[in-house]
Image: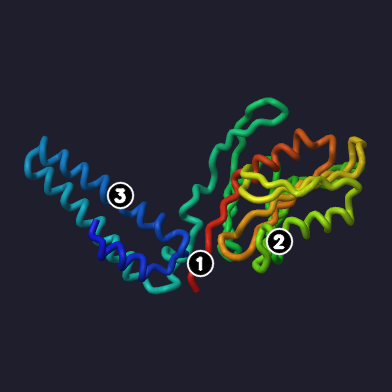
Amino acid sequence: MDQKLKQRLLEQSDASIGLKDEIWERLESQLDATSLQAASYKAKRKSSKWMKTTTGIAAAAIALVAFLALPPGTALMKSVQSWFAPEKKIEISVEGQKEQTNGQVHVDEESRYAIYYDKDRYKLIPGEGKDTITTIEELPAPYPQVSLTIEQDVKQTPEQLANQVAAQLAERFSKVDAVERVSSPVDGYRIHAINGNDRLSEVATVYVTSNKLKGSFVLSLEYFLEAAEGHGARFEQTVKQFEVLGPSEQ
């Protein structure tokens, strides 16, 4: 593709810096696929069919020019929601058994993240500075409520924040494990805490990962010991679906 055209796209797009390459790749892949199809038709078909393919390339080029001409703030340029399927099947492993869940996407364009969660078991409650994934219906007494919360700290790096989170957990839990460097389910730090050994003992697992700037995302899983292989495992699988979108241009 023409390098000048690509440069113009990168300069004029109001999409996020982190998504510019993805935008270009998607557009370019569509044009390249059309070009390959055109070459095949040229070799095998008559000129009339070649003209149809050429028309397809021209239409794609016009669409790209229209994309570049969109004013800042236009929904197509600004919204990330359309890059994600609203729902998708997700295979998870719970209590040693594989199963498929119906994942529903949540895209937070302000905090710049996306996540799929099991829509048949959980709901996502947006909040001021914190989103919460929890059971659709509250668990009956005496079971503690379970949740996965997502928060962002824009001022502290994961390295700085992990020890702070551990100290905060020590105020609530009788046992807090040492901060652990992990690469899964997210790349960052893991802190695990528990209050006793009873089946209803509260458990917390917290992951701290980069927000691709100078800050961090904190994903806190809270459940009870008996639910470690149920809700706990499902929340771990949900964290695997977490994706940082990167910074957006203002």
Amino acid type for the residue under numbered disc 1: Ser
Front tag of 2 and 3:
2
The foreground one among 169 and 75 is 169
For image coordinates 26% across by 48% down, the residue present is 32
- Closest to the camera, between mark 1 and mark 2, is 2
- The residue identified by callout 3 is 30
In the image, residue 130 lies at what x, y percent?
A: 71, 61
Q: Which disc number belongs to residue 154? A: none
Label 1 crowd (10 A; few <14 / some 14-19 / many >=20): some
Label 3 sits on what residue type? Gln
Q: Residues within 10 Å of mark 3 (few under 14, many from 20)?
A: few
How far apart marks 2 and 3 lie (CA) works out to 43 Å
Residue at the disc numbered 1: 248
Q: Is residue 146 visible to us here?
A: no
Secondary structure of residue under mark 3: helix
User: What is the distance, in whole Å, between disc 3 and disc 1 at their CAs?
Assistant: 24 Å
The x, y position of residue 2, in whole percent, is 23, 60
Mark 2, secondary structure of its residue: helix
Colour mode?
rainbow
Q: Earlier in the sequence, mark 1 or mark 2?
A: 2
In 3D space, how far apart are the residues under numbered discs 1 and 2 (Cα atoms)? 24 Å
Q: Is residue 201 above or below residue 77?
A: above
Q: Nearer the viewer, residue 174 or 22?
A: 174
Residue to which mark 2 is pinned: 160
Q: Are marks 2 and 3 in contact (CB under 8 Å)?
A: no
Rendered location of residue 200, percent (x, y): 89, 39
Query: What is the three-letter code of the residue carrying label 2?
Result: Gln
Residue at the farthest top position: 97
